[in-house]
Amino acid sequence: MNWGVIGKIADSMREFGWEGPPLLVHHRGDGFYEAWMGTHRLKGAELADLDKIPIVEMGPPGGLDCCGFHQIGDPESSLDSARKTREPS
């Protein structure tokens, strides 16, 4: 990971919040989700102490399954495998 880029992303997120497209994630099947794209933004969001970030969950091959928000957890947890919570309808 490029920590200089991540630091700039975190600084921007502290000032403006999440900007840009949602994080693209895939359900691993064990209750965790893996970030496919946007891992620098995910780490930047954690460093900026954001509570939630927008996600798009990849479904079966060829389609998107759902959208929601990723609840950022313990800073010591794995960046690419964090539990996701959905916003209530």
Image (cartoon, helix red, strand yellow):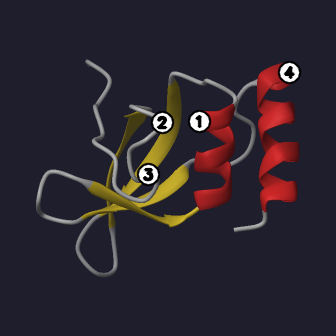
Front tag of 3 and 1: 1
The reply to whether dot 3 and dot 4 touch (C-beta < 8 Å) is no
* Helix, strand or loop for disc 1: helix
Callout 4: SS: helix
Which residue is label 4 attached to?
15
Say above or below: 50 vs 45: above
Identified at 39% across, 31% down, the residue is: 73
Seen in the picture, residue 30 relative to 14 is either above or below; the reply is below
Foreground: disc 3 or disc 4: 4
Query: Residue 53 location in percent, x, y?
Result: 53, 34
Taking 82 as reference, is 55 left or right? Answer: right
- Residue extending farthest front: 76
Residue situated furthest bottom in the rendering? 61
Task: Answer whether labels 1 and 2 touch (C-beta < 8 Å).
Answer: yes
The residue positioned 11% from the left and 59% from the top of the image is 30
- The type of residue carrying mark 2 is Pro
Disc 1 marks which amino acid?
Glu
Between the residue at mark 1 and the residue at mark 2, the CA separation in whole angstroms equals 7 Å
How crowded is the residue under tag 2: few (<14 C-alpha within 10 Å), some, or many (20+)? few
Q: Which residue, given by chain and number where applicable, does mark 1 sit on? A: 46
Q: Earlier in the sequence, mark 3 or mark 4?
A: 4
Residue picked out by circle 3: 56
Circle nearer the N terminus (3, 2): 3
Confirm or deny contact between disc 3 and disc 1 (CB under 8 A): no
Q: Amino acid at mark 3?
A: Val
| Residue appearing at x 57%, y 47% in the figure | 22
Mark 4 or 1, nearer chain start: 4
Would you name the residue on which mark 2 appears? 75
User: x, y percentage for residue 11?
Assistant: 85, 33
In front: mark 3 or mark 2? 2
In the image, 62 versus 51, the foreground residue is 51
